[in-house]
Image (spheres, grey):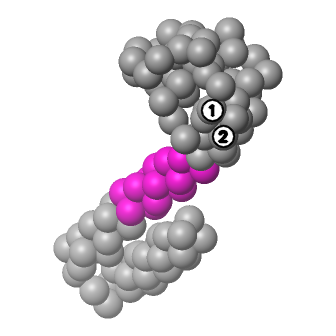
């Protein structure tokens, strides 16, 4: 995605340089550079958006990876487990006591009732 956006931006820059050479040679009017310049601006914005999307996808992948490790983390480090609801730490049983994953991990012997 980033590579494609970068290639489009580079093509627009090359088109601008070619148009600029024509203007410098007197073969084209100065205002003929307006469109290529606007296209460069548009592609630069598109590239910035592509960078943002790539960063977001990377962040989501990290979050999914961390989420995948929660059942293990909750059983091994319950005091460090994040609370999804309010951002504070919580014990494994307060987060997972009603979840199927917690019931499987504890084999249904969870002492706390569902909240």
> Residue 75 sits in which quadrant?
top right
Tell me the residue at 28%/86% (across/down).
Answer: 28
Tell me the residue at 48%/76% (across/down).
Answer: 8
Q: Nearer the viewer, residue 114 or 55?
A: 114
Say few, some or many: other residues with alpha carbon within 10 Å of mark 1 (under 14 / 14 to 19 / 20 or more).
Answer: few
Does 25 sit above or below residue 4? below
Q: Nearer the viewer, residue 44 or 82?
A: 82
Residue 78 position within the rendered picture, expressed as x and y whole percent measured from the top left:
69, 15
- Left or right of 78? Residue 99 is left
Q: Is residue 24 visible?
A: no
Tell me the residue at 53%/53% (across/down).
Answer: 57
Residue 52 position within the rendered picture, expressed as x and y whole percent measured from the top left:
46, 49
Find out whether the residues at labels 1 and 2 contact each other: C-beta distance under 8 Å.
no
Q: Nearer the viewer, residue 82 or 26?
A: 82
Q: Secondary structure at mark 2?
A: helix
> Residue 111 sits in which quadrant?
top right
Q: Which residue is mark 1?
A: 108
Q: Which residue is mark 2?
A: 104
Q: Nearer the viewer, residue 103 or 61?
A: 103
- Left or right of 65? Residue 37 is left
Bounds of the magenta segment: 45-62
Residue 81 position within the rendered picture, expressed as x and y whole percent measured from the top left:
63, 19
Residue 59 highlighted magenta (yes or no): yes
Residue 79 highlighted magenta (yes or no): no
Say few, some or many: other residues with alpha carbon within 10 Å of mark 2 (under 14 / 14 to 19 / 20 or more).
Answer: few
Does 74 sit above or below residue 24? above
- Left or right of 111? Residue 36 is left
Instruction: Name the magenta segment's main secondary structure.
Output: helix
Does 83 sit above or below residue 40? above
Tell me the residue at 53%/14% (across/down).
Answer: 112
Q: Is residue 22 visible?
A: yes
């Amino acid at each position: 995605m980033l590579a494609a956006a970068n290639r489009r931006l580079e093509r627009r820059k090359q088109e601008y340089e070619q148009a600029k050479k024509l203007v410098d040679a007197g073969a084209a009017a100065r205002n003929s550079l307006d469109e290529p310049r606007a296209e460069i601006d548009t592609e630069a914005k598109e590239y910035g958006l592509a960078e943002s999307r790539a960063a977001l996808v990377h962040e989501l992948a990290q979050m999914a990876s961390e989420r995948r490790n929660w059942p293990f983390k909750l059983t091994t480090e319950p005091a460090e487990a994040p609370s999804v609801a309010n951002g504070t730490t919580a014990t494994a049983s307060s987060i997972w006591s009603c979840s199927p994953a917690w019931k499987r991990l504890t084999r249904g012997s969870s002492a706390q009732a569902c909240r």
